């Protein structure tokens, strides 16, 4: 009993292994993996572009602060009072920090723009290669199916050539005669030997 169960399990394992080794199945899985890679590539573009957008916003904010501080300093200097001069000096120190921030953000933005452009080129190149491989895999699957059909047709033609059309017809006629004989025998056994020719 256990040996029969072991044979069944072995045959199932053999079936699954042969199914897993099927080139068509492997190509289909490869196509699916490549399709799943495309969104990941898009995510790279989204991330690099998001960094660029954030830096653009930071730069605009820093430039707005710079303009505001310059206007505040001019206003304070125009007023001329000692309190206004002290405010202008404080604003001047802050302005110096803001200008450093503007310069740093501008450099980061340039680097982010270059990174995004390079990522775009790289991702488009990789996508193009993936699409070409997907198409190549699809063609290979179609050719494999076509070859299987051709092999089946060749086997059928070889059988016809080997046995001939008459032999094939005789083979099926013999099968039909055998079924008729078995049916008559069943009726004869069931009826206890009645004449089956009348039936």
Image (spheres, rainbow, N blue to C red):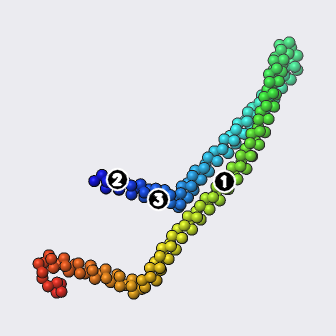
Relative to the observer, which residue lies in front, 154 or 54? 154
Q: Residue at x 46, y 78 (%)?
A: 156
Q: In x, y percent, where is residue 57?
A: 73, 35
State the residue position of label 2: 6
Q: Residue at x 61, y 58 (%)?
A: 134
Local packing at callout 1 (Cα closer than 10 Å; few below 14, some 14-19, many 20+) is: some
State the residue position of label 1: 127
Nearer mark to the viewer, of 2 and 3 = 2
Instruction: Let me know if residue 185 appears in the view.
Output: yes
> Gap between marks 3 and 1, in whole Å?
32 Å
Quarter occupied by the C terminus: bottom left
N-term-proximal mark, 2 vs 3: 2
Relative to the observer, which residue lies in front, 101 or 142? 142
Q: Residue at x 55, y 58 (%)?
A: 27
Relative to the observer, which residue lies in front, 132 or 193? 193
Badges 2 and 3: C-beta atoms under 8 Å apart? no
Nearer mark to the viewer, of 1 and 2 = 2
């Amino acid at each position: 009993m256990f040996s029969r169960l072991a044979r069944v399990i072995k045959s199932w394992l053999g079936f699954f292994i042969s199914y897993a080794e099927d080139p068509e199945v492997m190509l289909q899985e490869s196509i699916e993996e490549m399709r799943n890679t495309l969104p990941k590539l898009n995510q790279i573009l989204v991330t690099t572009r998001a960094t660029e957008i954030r830096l653009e916003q930071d730069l605009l904010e820093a430039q707005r602060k710079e303009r505001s501080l310059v206007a505040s300093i001019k206003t304070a200097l125009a007023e001329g009072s000692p309190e206004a001069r002290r405010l202008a000096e404080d604003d001047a120190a802050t302005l110096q920090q803001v200008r450093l921030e503007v310069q740093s953000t501008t450099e980061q933005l340039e680097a982010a723009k270059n990174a995004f452009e390079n990522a775009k080129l790289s991702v488009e190149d990789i996508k193009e290669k993936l699409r070409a491989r997907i198409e190549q895999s699809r063609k290979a699957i179609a050719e494999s199916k076509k070859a299987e059909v051709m092999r089946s047709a060749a086997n059928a033609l070889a059988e016809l050539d080997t046995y001939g059309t008459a032999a094939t017809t005789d083979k099926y006629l013999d099968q039909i005669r055998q079924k008729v004989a078995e049916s008559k025998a069943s009726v004869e056994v069931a009826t206890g030997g009645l004449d089956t020719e009348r039936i």
